[in-house]
Amino acid sequence: MALLDVRNISVEVDEAEILHGVSLEINKGETHVLMGPNGAGKSTLGYALMGNPNYRVTQGDIYFNGLSIKDESADKRAKAGLFLSFQNPLEVPGITLSSFIRNAIVQQTGEKVKFSEFKKNLKESMELLSFDESYKDRDLNAGFSGGEKKKAEILQLLMLKPSLAILDETDSGLDVDAVRTVSKGIEAYQKKKEGALLIITHSTRILESLKVDRTHILVKGRIVKTGDASLVQEINEHGFEAYL
Amino acid sequence: MSDSKAGVKDVDLSIYDFRYEEKDFYRVDEGLTEDIVRQISKEKKDPEWMADFRLESLETYRKMDIPEWGPDISGLNMDDIVTYVRPNTEMKAKWSDVPDDIKNTFERLGIPDAERKSLAGVGAQYDSELVYHNVKEEVKEQGVVYTDMESALTNYEDMVREHFMKLVPPTDHKFAALHGAVWSGGSFVYVPPGVSVEIPLQSYFRLNAPGAGQFEHTLIIVSEGADLHFIEGCSAPKYNVANLHAGCVELYVGKNAHLRYSTIENWSKNMYNLNTKRAICEEGALMEWVSGSFGSHVSYLYPMTILKGDNSHVEFTGITFAGKGQNLDTGSKVIQIGKNTSSAIDTKSISKDGGISTFRSAVTIMPDADNAKTSISCASLMLDDRSRSDTVPALDIRTQDADVGHEAKIGRISDDAIFYLMSRGISENEARAMIVSGFANPVSKELPLEYAVEMNNLIHLEMEGN
């Protein structure tokens, strides 16, 4: 049984259909890459999978661990083990990064978190991401630079340990060093937590150190080609021209 | 957004709505007459000047009109209000001596607990009299006076006479006049020159009898170079009869002195809260207000600061939460007289379920106030389409070189922010509560820990879903 089984879904935003019958299967621990030109509907797929109420699934179904999650709210999907790293993470004043993560863990697991253990894990994960420790006491994303916001997303990924993480253009707007740091975090998630990934990206830099199982090309709301890791290289060299 | 989507409903404050059977031994007739005022004076053994003061105030009260510029208070009928209720107990020095029914009420409000947390002293007001009062020895040894107003009138008569309703004269407005006529209870604090009171002094006011108004008077004198933090907390049970609160707070902040006055007012939702608070700052003084307004049906609350001395400063930090059936008109006033004075007003308001929250400020910079600065900032969060938030900032600048800043923001919680938090496994209700708590955080972090926790609990109560 696939971890994620997307069966022929169409998705509407503001009454305009963006995705037209998309199917996708991701197994436990697999890494998939979703590429495509601007406006193809890549982020729409991410939002629809995570359950953003503004992204309506009008056709098809989404199964996660064998159960339909199409009608579940985003928090239920998160509790089931789904995670979305946002392209533009929102700023939430008045809640510190560490208390937010701790709160999210408590809400997801329904269990109390041992403070000393939490502190240790947070410190280790922040070190892995070369994320200045002082950020844990800053308000969630408030006044963070683009790179810091992305680090904060990957930090949440490492702390929340989902079984499938969708990364929506985590590499966009980052310099070379930041991409390298962030992919170190993603690699750790992939290896240590045996996490599955759906990586939405324009570029290939973030994929350099990651083992990729499948690559999908999304154009105008449809998956037009699926292949192995070599497809990434092909797109890298020739662009999407051949698929438009 | 619809109710079902928001999933938030009006607050159930029932956890605070507890009361015990009344046991009054003295209760005046309903309605306000000269005889009632005389009775109060007699009962309280007022000195002659105070008895006269009350009667003059009553005259003023009769002559003045009810204010018409703010929220509607026509639901308030003065003839229904028993102005004076005195609990059946004498002043107690030890907690164990306080009668059980009164003690139970305070136990549930956590007063002895707060005391254990090494607050300097607890003056808890049950109805109109202080029933429990204990100032720690170390504070007393510093020469600090912390007592109820009645005792102060006996033991510190000259000081009271010099300051009582001089900052807020009965002619200020109709409810100040009413206060002057029927005031009862409250706290008196005197901090001698140069004395720093290390731990905050705290008073907890509470109304209990149905239909009883409360007119407590707080008079605080912080002498030159002295430092004090005073905390006022309020919680009242809910009744069907309209309740009135017309307290008065007068704060005298001496040269280079510092006073921080923190309040969380959580009146029951049928209360008319027409409270007057005012501070005057001498040269180099610093006044800080931290003010949280939660309960009440209608509130008029605009703590005022007069920056009389050169180089004196005021900072006002406030939050107001207006839910169903509430019209809360709050803000702050400042008059800058001295040179190089500065004022900073920073407020937040939250309205929900048709609640109305109005921010009203008035800053006056007088002609001699050279190099004055003022900054006013208010942010309002509306949790649904039925609620209302207004901003009425008034500025009267009479100098050429004033540095004036004003900023007003009104917003809603974005759906994207809710979705972001939900994508981390947080429920929609919890996500909203987190965002509102975060919005209130700049205020709660100014409060002592146990009050910050209480305020956070209040916000969660207000936000709680089905």
Image (cartoon, rainbow, N blue to C red):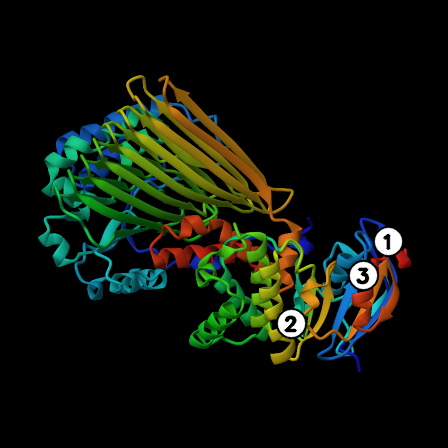
Q: CA distance from mark 1 to mark 3?
A: 31 Å
Q: Position of residue B293 (x, y in %)?
A: 43, 45
Residue position for label 2: A79
Q: Secondary structure at mark 3?
A: helix
Q: Is residue B21 visible?
A: no
Q: CA distance from mark 2 to mark 1?
A: 28 Å
Name the residue at 29% across, 62% down.
B103
Depicted B107 relative to depicted B159: above or below: below
Return the residue found at the far bottom: A1
Q: Quadrant of residue B312?
A: top left
Q: Is residue A20 visible?
A: yes
Q: Foreground residue, A164 or A171?
A: A171
Q: Quadrant of residue A232?
A: bottom right
Depicted A197 relative to depicted B175: above or below: below
**Same subunit under labels 2 and 1?**
yes
In this rendering, position of residue B303 left or right of residue A29: left
Amino acid bearing label 1:
Glu
Amino acid bearing label 2:
Lys
Residue position for label 1: A17
Q: Quadrant of the C terminus of chain B?
A: bottom right
Q: Secondary structure at mark 2?
A: helix
